[in-house]
Image (spheres, helix red, strand yellow):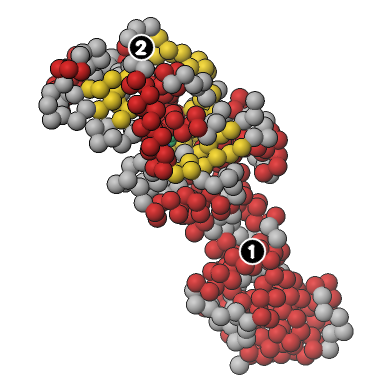
Amino acid sequence: MSVVTRFAPSPTGFLHIGGARTALFNYLFAKHYGGQFLLRIEDTDRKRSTDEAIQAILHGLSWLALDWDGDETYQSHNADRHREVADQLLAEDKAYRCYCTPEELAEMREKARESGSSTRIYDGRWRDRDPAEAPAGVDPVIRIKMPLDGQTTIADLVQGEVTRSNDTLDDFIILRSDGSPTYMLAVVVDDQDMGVTHAIRGDDHLNNAFRQHHLFAACGWETPAFAHIPLIHGADGAKLSKRHGALGVEAYEEMGFLPEAVCNYLLRLGWSHGDDEIISRDQAIEWFDLANVGRSPARFDMDKLSNLNAHYLKDAAPLRLAAIILADAEAAGTTVSPAAEERLVAGMPGLVSRAKNTHELYDLSKFYLSDTPITMNNKARDALDGDGAHEVLSALAERLGEATSWNEDALDGIAREFAESHDMKLGKIAQPLRAALTGSNVSPSIFEIMAVLGRDETLARLENARN
Ligand code: GLU
């Protein structure tokens, strides 16, 4: 059997981080078994579904490199097929028309509430009633006949065997009175038609699984394997909310996280492979299985995500990071010269070890992005106004002008020799030099910076600092 999974988001909101993890698990499981990962947009709720949300879902999945096989399916396009299945069930007496009025249903709900039991609400009053008794002018719904007694067990691939008493499963609606299919019917028919073998989703759908199982059976279809993964909680153990970072995936992109860091973090959120923390996409595909998905809710931890991001920043190609930073600069209305672009790429290895996200990286890189004259912060100004700073810089500039080779080691040597011959501590030189080169008091190694800037730009900055 070849594995087919699907991610089936409802486009009523953005792709949030829990949804992204569900998509990731479906993707990895399919790829692990050499199968297919499908995307189905469950847009049957026409009022609450928006194009904006669909675009956000497609963009979020693409950003995370969770590429789905084939074209995405739009559930709303399958409504005729859903109706056809409902009619078939009706013809086979596995479903029936129900003419209950809203008042009758409210009564049943009230009764169920009063008795406080978890058994079914709808009392099945039209299940065996003669349709000839149907009241005039009432558009019926279609309900599925559920088993009246016994129990149902689902062998969930994450939760294990879960059993429900069938008296908790009422004859639910599969087709509304306006002829529109319900979520329950649409999911079952689409899963069947798309050949889905494994439905991996949040455990908030576990209760639905029992109903869907009987619907599959009524249609004469095999129920796919279910895997209900625990929802994500916040660091304080409460259900994840906005306050905890339950944001749309695009918010993480905006916060300067790299997609591979987000994926690695989400993978580890509820799934483990020994003590491994840093797991590449290829390793994840090789190792992923549902057996190692935990049964208790994982806690979302921003600091861990940040640490992983710092790791992936160091691994990322300088050209790729430069492109992200140049986009940030453009968004901020800053024009960057071609020479500055080159500096940015060359200086990236020194910058990247100091940043946890691409915004920090952008801030750190500003002295490479601008050409002389660069802006100075107050601390840099203080350093340049310090005792003898100008004299030091001018003497050093002269010495640097004579340098025969221009690389980190050579520049380091020149500075040390200069300090020694002037009977100064290296720090006394480094401070104003750093200020002149970067406009700040913190930066990567000044020798590295001078090597990246090149002789002309270095001397221009020293000259500018003295004026
Ligand atoms: N559309 C449902 C949701 O977004 C998922 C349905 C399913 O995975 O079966 O929660």
Q: Residues within 10 Å of mark 2 (few under 14, many from 20)?
A: some
| In the depicted structure, whether residue 245 falls above or below residue 290 | below
Query: Is the Cβ of the residue at disc 2 closer than 8 Å to that at disc 1?
Result: no
Task: Respond yes or no on whether mark 2 lies under 8 Å from ligand 1.
Answer: no
In primary-sequence order, the first of circles 2 and 1 is 2
The residue at which mark 2 appears reads as 147
Where does label 1 land, which residue? 321
Query: Which label sits in the foreground, 2 or 1?
Result: 2
SS at mark 1 in the image: helix
Quadrant where the image shows the C terminus: bottom right
Q: Residue at x 75, y 81 (%)?
A: 454
What residue appears at the point 46 percent right and 13 percent down from the top-left corner? 153
The answer to whether residue 270 of the structure is visible from this angle is no
**Quarter the N terminus occupies:** top right
- Quarter containing ligand 1? top left
Task: Answer few, some or many: residues within 10 Å of disc 1's Cα (few below 14, many 20 plus, some between 14 and 19).
Answer: many
Instruction: From the viewer's side, name the closer residue of 144 and 12.
Output: 144
**In which quadrant of the rendered view does residue 416 lie?**
bottom right
Identified at 67% across, 32% down, the residue is 33
Vertical position of residue 366 compared to residue 247: above or below: below
Residue drawn at the location 87% of the way across and 84% of the way down: 404
> Does 45 sit above or below residue 127?
below
